[in-house]
Amino acid sequence: MATAAVARIKDTVFEWEGKDKNGKVVRGEMRAGGEAMVSASLRRQGVMVNKVKKRRTSGGKSIKQKDIAIFTRQLSTMMRAGVPLIQSFDIVARGSTNPKLTRLLTDIRSDVETGTSLSAAFRKHPLYFDALYCNLVEAGEAGGILETLLDRLAIYQEKTMAIKAKIKSAMIYPIAVLVVAFVVLSVIMIFVIPAFEDVFKNFGADLPAPTLIVISISKIFVAYWYLIFGIIGGGVYFFLQSWKRSPKMQRYMDRLLLRIPVFGPLLNKTAIARWTRTLSTMFAAGVPLVEALDSVGGASGNAVFKDATDQIQKDVSTGSALTTSMQTTGVFPIMVIQMCAIGEESGSLDAMLGKAAEFYEDEVDEAVKGLSSLMEPIIIVILGTLIGGIVVSMYLPIFKLGQVV
C-alpha cells in the first residue's frame, strides 16, 4: 500500500514569437514539456524562434485512473487499426472532455514527436503512469508489439479498477450507515434527551438507572459537543494521514486488516488477485521475472504482499525457484503455489497466473455479494440495539408514572 512521493505535474502552455521563412513576425501558443521542445518543434516548421515564454493555465477536473484506462484502450484500438502513434494521440486528445488530460496527452505527443521514446515520455509523468505501465510500454517498443502490450495494459487496468470498485462498494455501505447513525444519535443526545429531562424533573420520583445513564451521556454531548466532534474528526484525519504516509503504520494496518474475521479474507483474496494478474501481465509481455517483481509487490495494494514480493525477488535473483520462494513467505495459498509450479514446469507461467487471477477475481465477486448480505442484518441489529435502548430508557420513567400518581 506504500505510495511513492511524486511531484505534481504543472499544467502549462508556452507563448512563442519568431519569424517565418519570409521574415514575417509570427506568434502563437504551444503545449509542450519544455521550452526546448517548443523550439525544436518550431524549427521543424521553418520558424526562427526569438522568444519562448511559459504561461500558467488552469481549469479542468483532475485526471483519474479511469481516464488513463480509457486513454490506453483508445490508443490500443487505434494502433491496432493502423493509425500512426502521433495521429492517435491527436485523436484521443481532441476527443477528451477534460482539459487537463488533453494537455497531458499533448505534452506526451510533443515529446514523442521530438524523438523521445513513448515509455520515456510516460516516465516524465509518474503521477499518472506508474513503473508497471512504463515497463510494459518499454517492453512493447523493444519487441515491436506495442499495440498488443497496450491492449494487455488496458485489460489489466479495467480488471484492477473492477476489483477496486467492488471493494469500495463493500466498504462504503457499512461506513455510511455508521456515520449516519452517529449523526442521528448525536442529534438525539443534544436536542431530544434534554427535552425529556425537563419533563422528568416534574415526576417527583427517582429515575431508573438506564435513564440516568442516557441523561448523563446527553449532558456530556451538550456541554462538549464541539470537543467530541473535533476529537473524532481530527482523530480520523490524523489516523488516515499516518496510515498513508508512515510505512510502519501501513504494515501494521495491512497485517491487522488481513486478520479481521469478515473483511480479512476478502482483502486477502483481492491482494492475491491483483498480485497474480500483475505478474501474469508483466511475464506475458516478456519482462524478465526479477524485473517484473519490482512492480508486482506495490500493485498488490498490501504491505504484507509487498514485503513477501521483495523477499521472493531476492531469492529468485540468487537462483531459487519462484514457487519455492513463494512457499517460504507463507502468504500465498497452496492452490496459487501449485499453479505456479505447473506453469514453471510447462513453460506457461503467464497462462497459469492468469487462470489463478481469474479464479480469485471470481472469489472476490462472490465474497462481496456475501459480505453485502451479511452486513445488512448485522447493521440492523446494531442500530436497533442502540436506538431501541435509548427509546426504552427514556420511556421507563413514564411506565413508573402510575406509581407516583
Image (cartoon, rainbow, N blue to C red):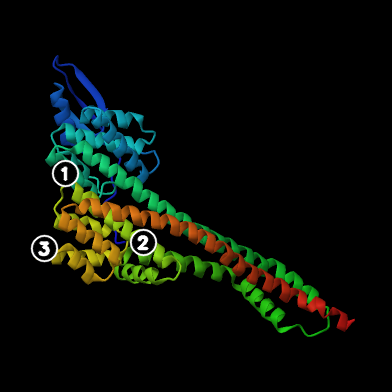
Does label 1 or label 3 sit earlier along the sequence?
Answer: 1
Of pointers 2 and 1, the one earlier in the residue sequence: 1
Whether residue 12 is visible: no
Q: Residue furthest top?
A: 22
Residue 269 marker: 2
In space, the residues marked 1 and 3 are separated at their CA atoms by 22 Å
Which quadrant of the structure image shows residue 69?
A: top left
Where in the figure is residue 387, as x and y percent of width and height? 66, 69
Residue 204 visible to an observer of this rendering: yes
Kindly identify the residue that appears in the image at 83 percent across and 79 percent down. 203
Quarter of the picture containing the N terminus is bottom left
Give coordinates of residue 341: x percent, y percent: 20, 61
- Left or right, residue 74 beside residue 110: right
How many C-alpha atoms fall within 10 Å of the one at disc 2: few (<14), some, or many (≥20)?
A: many
Choose between 164 and 353: the one closer to the eye.
353
> Of tags 3 and 2, which is closer to the observer?
2
- The residue that mark 3 highlights is 317
Three-letter amino acid code at the position of disc 3 = Ser
Residue pointed to by mark 1: 138
Question: What distance separates the C-alpha of mark 2 from that of mark 1?
Answer: 30 Å
Q: Residues within 10 Å of mark 3 (few under 14, many from 20)?
A: some
> Label 2 is placed on what type of residue?
Lys
Q: Quadrant of residue 110?
A: top left
Q: Residue at x 38, y 36 (%)?
A: 98
